[in-house]
């Protein structure tokens, strides 16, 4: 068992048994002229100021109120650390707009300073899922790098093509071999909602894109796993409102809970979606921004992640320059989706390595 820091021990106890008493404050941030809410979480029984983390949520309807994110930030606060979770309203509306990451992080850092609750030192930045690569890349921004001590990415992506192919087909490629895993349908619903009408020939498929956005929103609001049979009647009702000439497209993104999409057609449209995404917003491809990161960076990813495959963690690491002093941990201990039982016998052996990674992460600030 590795030597654990006091913070990591406190974090694990708080995660498993519940946090120490914390104080949660709601504040407003100025994001380049737009007022956005944020939640600050700090220890109740300790005087400030505190070391601080900025925590970025992913593309999810609950946003900063996501159950697991709330649990995470409360556990971090139990370590004697302040966290601020800024809202990205556009991400709650399921719009993939990565260019809002840096200004949101900047606004959160200013907000921390104005409260007087954070120590006058660089902060840590954590990004989850879609927000992960952009949170990491923020430390390479000229106006942010001096204010960021280090970054952490949980479950992030790097390659648009490989991520979208996995979302559509379940196939992904690691350093050594190809892998097959049933993809969480939520990913392809989000991709189609945002980029289908940017694919040449599908500009008029606005009804399909709208239906996919409605389906993804229903998933986020209901909390049911996206391949639950309860979605089947919802999908059928949405399908009835789509023009007959577009229904084959809708079917490609919404295979029933008992089936997978048509693999060749799904692979083709995945590459087209990636091209459309890069055209719509070049910042959706994080590789150029990642090359400017100066570090340190910690990348963590679930080996059985059904939304973004673990192979993306290796691509993220390889996209970072050597000076970033990056660390990578792939583990069975967590993932995006909640559909898998905890693989106790196999995963328990990973606890020491994950504990080491956790200690390194919590020592960044």
Image: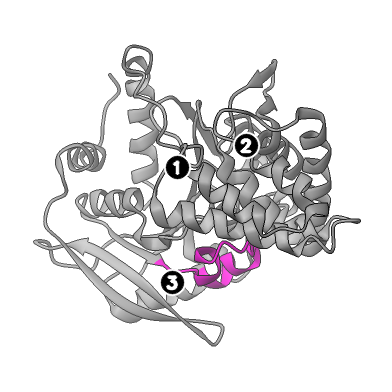
Whole-percent x, y for residue 227 in the image = 51, 37
Please give the range of residues in magenta.
86-104
196 magenta-colored: no
Q: Which residue is mark 3?
A: 108
What is the distance, in whole Å, between disc 3 and disc 2 at their CAs? Answer: 26 Å
Q: Nearer the viewer, residue 73 or 66?
A: 66
Q: Nearer the viewer, residue 262 or 352?
A: 262
Q: Which residue is mark 2?
A: 317
Q: Earlier in the sequence, mark 3 or mark 1?
A: 3
Q: Quadrant of residue 362?
A: top left
Q: Nearer the viewer, residue 183 or 226?
A: 226
Give neighbour class at mark 3: few <14, some 14-19, many 20+ (Cα, 10 Å): many
Query: In this rendering, would 333 be left or right of 157?
Result: left
Q: Earlier in the sequence, mark 3 or mark 2?
A: 3
Whole-percent x, y for residue 320 in the image = 66, 43
Whole-percent x, y for residue 56 in the image = 46, 59
Q: Classify the position of the N terminus by image quarter.
A: top left
94 magenta-colored: yes
Q: Earlier in the sequence, mark 1 or mark 2?
A: 1
Query: In this rendering, would 152 be left or right of 279?
Result: left
Residue under the image location 19 percent in, 41 percent down: 10
Residue under the image location 21 percent in, 54 percent down: 80
Q: Which residue is mark 1?
A: 230
Give neighbour class at mark 1: few <14, some 14-19, many 20+ (Cα, 10 Å): few
Residue sticking out furthest to the bottom: 33
């Amino acid at each position: 068992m590795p030597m654990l820091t006091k913070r990591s021990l406190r974090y694990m106890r708080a995660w498993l048994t519940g946090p120490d008493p914390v104080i949660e404050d709601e504040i407003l941030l100025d994001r380049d002229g737009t007022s956005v809410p944020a939640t600050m979480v700090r220890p109740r029984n300790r005087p400030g100021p505190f070391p601080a983390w900025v925590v970025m949520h992913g593309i999810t309807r609950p946003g900063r109120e996501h159950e697991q994110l709330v649990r995470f930030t409360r556990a971090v606060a139990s370590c004697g650390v302040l966290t601020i979770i800024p809202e990205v309203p556009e991400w709650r509306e399921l719009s993939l707009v990565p260019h809002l990451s840096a200004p949101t992080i900047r606004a959160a850092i200013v907000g921390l300073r104005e409260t007087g609750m954070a120590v006058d030192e660089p902060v840590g930045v954590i990004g989850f899922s879609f927000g992960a690569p952009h949170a990491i890349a923020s430390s390479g921004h000229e106006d942010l790098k001096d204010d960021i001590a280090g970054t952490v990415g949980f479950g992030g992506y790097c390659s648009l093509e490989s991520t979208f192919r996995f979302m559509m087909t379940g196939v992904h490629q690691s350093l050594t071999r190809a892998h097959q895993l049933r993809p969480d349908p939520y990913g392809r619903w989000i991709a189609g909602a945002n980029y289908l009408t940017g694919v040449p020939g599908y500009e008029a498929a606005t009804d399909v894109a709208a239906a996919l956005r409605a389906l993804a929103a229903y998933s986020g609001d209901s909390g049911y796993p996206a391949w639950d049979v309860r979605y089947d009647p919802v999908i059928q009702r949405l399908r009835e409102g789509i023009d007959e000439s577009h229904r084959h497209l809708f079917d490609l993104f919404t295979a029933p809970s008992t089936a997978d999409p048509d693999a060749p057609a799904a692979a083709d449209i995945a590459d087209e979606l990636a091209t459309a995404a890069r055209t719509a917003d070049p910042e959706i491809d994080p590789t150029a921004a990642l090359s400017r990161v100066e570090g340190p960076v910690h990348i963590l990813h679930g080996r059985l992640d059904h939304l973004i495959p673990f192979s993306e963690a290796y691509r993220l690491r390889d996209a970072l320059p050597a000076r970033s002093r990056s660390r990578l941990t792939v583990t069975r201990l967590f993932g995006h989706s909640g559909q898998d039982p905890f693989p106790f016998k196999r995963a328990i052996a990973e606890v020491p390595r994950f504990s080491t990674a956790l200690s390194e992460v919590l020592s960044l600030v």
